[in-house]
C-alpha cells in the first residue's frame, strides 16, 4: 500500500512539474515538456527540438526543426527515413564531441559521453543544462563537462537560435589533452537537401563569412558558415556562429559536401597541412575549456550581410 502511494505521489509531482515548466516558458515563446529520454522543446505551436540524453555520443538534439516544422537535420541513426542517407552512423543530428581526447576517440570510436542525472530546466530563460562524463571503453573517467542550451524562437522573422555552451573540466590531478584531428567537434548532420554532392536529392549551397563558397569551405577558418536549401519548396538557411572568445577563433570547419557541418578549432594538421600536433591543446590540471556556438535556423532566405549582422549580434550577446 505504501508503494502505491509513493508511485501516485511521484506521478502527480511529475505531471505538476510538466505543467509548471510549460507555463513558465510561455512568455518566452519556448516551452519545455519532460519526455522519457529528455525534454521536448516547443515553439510557435510546433516542435523546435527534442533534447535526448540517449545519444551514442552524448546528448543530442533530434528532431531539430525550423519554424513551420521542417526538420533540418538527418534522422539516421536515431530513426529511418525512406531515401535518407545512412552513412556515418556516428553523426547524430546535433551533438558535441571530439575524436582525440587523452588518446580516446569519442567521435567514431569506443569512447562514451554519458549524461549524468536529469537535465536542469530554467524555464523563464529557455535554458537546459546538463552535466556529462567522458569515459574510456573500460568505464574509467577521462573528463567531465557542463553544457548549456539556450533556445529562442522569433515567429516574426521565422528565425530560431540555439546558443550552445560547453565547459570541459580537467581532473584535479592531471592535464587533459584535445588532439589535432579533423574529427570533431560542435556538429550538425544536415538532411539530404542541404548536401552539395548531387546525390540523393542534394540541392544545397554553402558560404562562409570570408565569402568562400561550395566545397572550398572545408577546412577554412571563418566566423560563421551557412548552408541553404529548399525544403518542400520553401527556402531554409542553417548557420553556425563561432564565438570570438573561443579557443582557435575563428574556427576551422569540418563542413562537407554530404551534410556534415562541424566547427573544429583543433584539426590544424588536416585542415591546413601544418605539422601533426599543431592543433593540440592541453588543459591544465583542474582547469577548464569553454566553447560557445550559436545555431541559427531560418525559414526563408538570408544574405551574407544579414548573416554577418546576426553574427555581430551573437558576438555582443556572447560578451555578456
Image (spheres, rainbow, N blue to C red):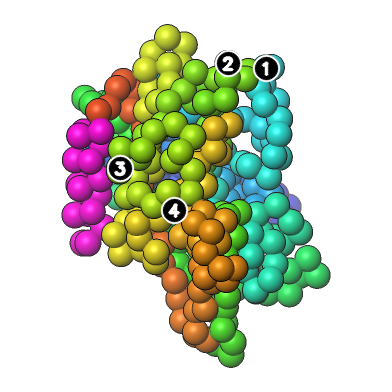
Q: Position of residue 1 (x, y in %)?
A: 73, 52
Q: Is residue 97 visible?
A: no
**Where does label 2 land, which residue?**
201
Left or right of 173, for residue 140: right
Graded by Cα atoms within 10 Å as few (under 14), some (14 to 19) or many (20 or more), the crowding at tag 4 reads many
Tag 4 near tag 2, CB within 8 Å: no
Cα distance between the residues tagged 1 and 4: 31 Å
Q: Secondary structure at mark 3?
A: loop
Left or right: 6, with 252 as reference point: right
Residue 187, horizontal then vertical, whole percent: 52, 46
For residue 315: magenta?
Answer: yes
Q: Dot 1, crowdedness within 10 Å: few (<14), some or many (≥20)?
A: few
Q: Is residue 209 above or below residue 45?
A: below
Q: Earlier in the sequence, mark 4 or mark 2?
A: 2
Say which mark, if any, is on residue 142. Answer: none
Q: Which residues are magenta?
A: 304-320
Amino acid at each position: 500500500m505504501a508503494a502505491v502511494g509513493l508511485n501516485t505521489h511521484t506521478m502527480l509531482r511529475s505531471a505538476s512539474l510538466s505543467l509548471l515548466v510549460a507555463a513558465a516558458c510561455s512568455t518566452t515563446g519556448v516551452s519545455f515538456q519532460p519526455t522519457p529520454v529528455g525534454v521536448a522543446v516547443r515553439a510557435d505551436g510546433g516542435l523546435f527540438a527534442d533534447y535526448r540524453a540517449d545519444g551514442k555520443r552524448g546528448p543530442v538534439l533530434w528532431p531539430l526543426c525550423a519554424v513551420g516544422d521542417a526538420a533540418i537535420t538527418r534522422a539516421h541513426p536515431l530513426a529511418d527515413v525512406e531515401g535518407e542517407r545512412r552513412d556515418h552512423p556516428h553523426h547524430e543530428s546535433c551533438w558535441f564531441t571530439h575524436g582525440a581526447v587523452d588518446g580516446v576517440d569519442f567521435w567514431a570510436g569506443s569512447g562514451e559521453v554519458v549524461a549524468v542525472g536529469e537535465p536542469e530546466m530554467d524555464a523563464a530563460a529557455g535554458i537546459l543544462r546538463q552535466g556529462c562524463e567522458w569515459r574510456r571503453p573500460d568505464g574509467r573517467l577521462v573528463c567531465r563537462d557542463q553544457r548549456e542550451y539556450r533556445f529562442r524562437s522569433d515567429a516574426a522573422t521565422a528565425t530560431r537560435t540555439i546558443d550552445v555552451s560547453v565547459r570541459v573540466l580537467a581532473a584535479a590531478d592531471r592535464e587533459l589533452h584535445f588532439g589535432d584531428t579533423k574529427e570533431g567537434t560542435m556538429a550538425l548532420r544536415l538532411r539530404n537537401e542541404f548536401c552539395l554532392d548531387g546525390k540523393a536529392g542534394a540541392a544545397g549551397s554553402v558560404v562562409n563569412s570570408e565569402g568562400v563558397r561550395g566545397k572550398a569551405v572545408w577546412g577554412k577558418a571563418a566566423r560563421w558558415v551557412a548552408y541553404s536549401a529548399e525544403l518542400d519548396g520553401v527556402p531554409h538557411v542553417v548557420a553556425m556562429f563561432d564565438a570570438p572568445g573561443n579557443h582557435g577563433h575563428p574556427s576551422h570547419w569540418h563542413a562537407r559536401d554530404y551534410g556534415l557541418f562541424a566547427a573544429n578549432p583543433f584539426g590544424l594538421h588536416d585542415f591546413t597541412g601544418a605539422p601533426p600536433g599543431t592543433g593540440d591543446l592541453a588543459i591544465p590540471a583542474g582547469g577548464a575549456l569553454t566553447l560557445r556556438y550559436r545555431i541559427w535556423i531560418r525559414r526563408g532566405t538570408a544574405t551574407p550581410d544579414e548573416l554577418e549582422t546576426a553574427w555581430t549580434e551573437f558576438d555582443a550577446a556572447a560578451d555578456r
